[in-house]
Image (cartoon, rainbow, N blue to C red):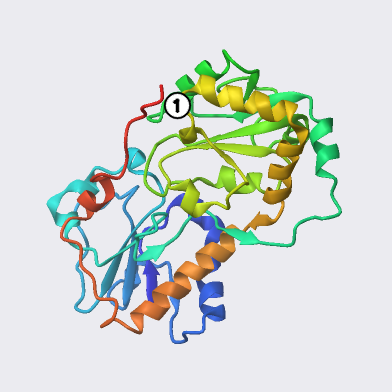
Amino acid sequence: MILFYNTPEWFSHFKDVCPQGLQKCPQRGCECSYDPTQIRRADAVLINVVQLSDTIPPAKQANQVWIMFGLECPYYYESKVHYSQQWRRVFNWTMTYRLDSDIALPYNVLLRTATHKSANFTKLALKKTKSVLWFASNCETPSRREDYVAELRKHIPTDVYGNCGSPMCSYGGDCQSSLFGEYRFYLAFENTLCIDYISEKLYKIYSENIVPIVRGGADYNSLLPKGTYINAADFSSPKELATYLKYLETNVTAYAEILENKSGYRHSDVETTYESAFCDICLKLHNLDKYHQYYYDSARWIHEDTCHNPKDV
């Protein structure tokens, strides 16, 4: 039995992913539960440590595997309880967006697909009349992305929508798609600079005809297909980035090539990513000798050398 002991509120939309994932899983012999009273029966116990309310852990049964679950980056862990000594040493596995987690659960993954040869990317590029687009709701962040954008705006037209700019259009609104058609570049800037942290907004841009500009703590060169994005880290300053963007605005062939390269990929369904993770748990539960693990300090694993302060603003 795989028990999710304290599911976050947002997970109510994903409760079917565990049974569905196990049904599709080649490893049989697992079931799901969201009933915390079943904890004594569980073989694996997922505990959401981001919003942990129990002051001390419940009794841990012999041979149980406890899994630390958390999809927030370290800056935004709301629970202080997790940092108590009682909680630090109870976990065997981790389940986070980090790729070194025992159960890796990224926000999305990119899948190779057939390039849309029928699309005229040069024509799409020529239709665009505006430069840089950014949607933002969090206006004061550890990554200081708002300061980077403020400097970028001095050198190239950059329009901001959402809580941090014009409220006339928000991310996910009906007006969003039309804006993607007008602008050449989209700022996929993360609110923190943390290892492997890439939020879902970047992946969703791969379904749009706009070039993403990334800024975060992940190793983008290893995680994203070459020639499908622009990395702010490759430029010494916002001004230098703006110079390159203005070059692409005048070189339609080079810009259209990025659009075409990007069209060869699509993002996975979030549900599929979760289903795969629960299947991974089942597989490892049936091979405990091979996947034996224990964390002597789970809070240290979350925080030590995992995020850094910006150096480009």
Q: Is residue 251 above or below residue 72?
A: above
Q: Residue at x 65, y 44 (%)?
A: 205
Q: Residue at x 51, y 22 (%)?
A: 238
Which corner quadrant holds the N terminus?
bottom left
- Of all residues shown, which one is farthest toward the bottom? 29
Q: Position of residue 188 (x, y in %)?
A: 56, 37
Q: Is residue 64 above or below residue 89?
A: below
Q: Residue at x 53, y 69 (%)?
A: 275
The secondary element bearing badge 1 is classed as: loop
- Residue in the foreground of this view, choosing between 97 and 39: 97
Q: Is residue 70 above or below residue 63?
A: above
Q: Characterize the local packing of mark 1: few (<14), some (14-19) or many (20 or more) Cα atoms within 10 angstroms.
A: few
Q: Position of residue 144 (x, y in %)?
A: 42, 25
**On the image, which quarter does residue 282 sit in?**
bottom left
Q: Position of residue 269 (x, y in %)?
A: 62, 59
User: Quick check: can you spot residue 87?
Assistant: yes
In the picture, measured across the screen, residue 1 lies left or right of residue 293, that is: right
Q: Position of residue 301 (x, y in %)?
A: 24, 53
- Residue in the foreground of this view, choosing between 223 and 306: 223
Q: Which residue is mark 1?
A: 236
In the picture, measured across the screen, residue 116 lies left or right of residue 95, that is: right
Q: How many marks?
A: 1
Q: Is residue 254 above or below residue 45?
A: above
In the picture, measured across the screen, residue 138 lies left or right of residue 227, that is: left
User: Quick check: can you spot residue 149?
Assistant: no
Amino acid, disc 1 = Ser
Which corner quadrant holds the C terminus?
top left
- Residue in the foreground of this view, choosing between 228 and 75: 228
**On the image, which quarter does residue 255 sit in?**
top right
- Residue in the foreground of this view, choosing between 5 and 137: 137
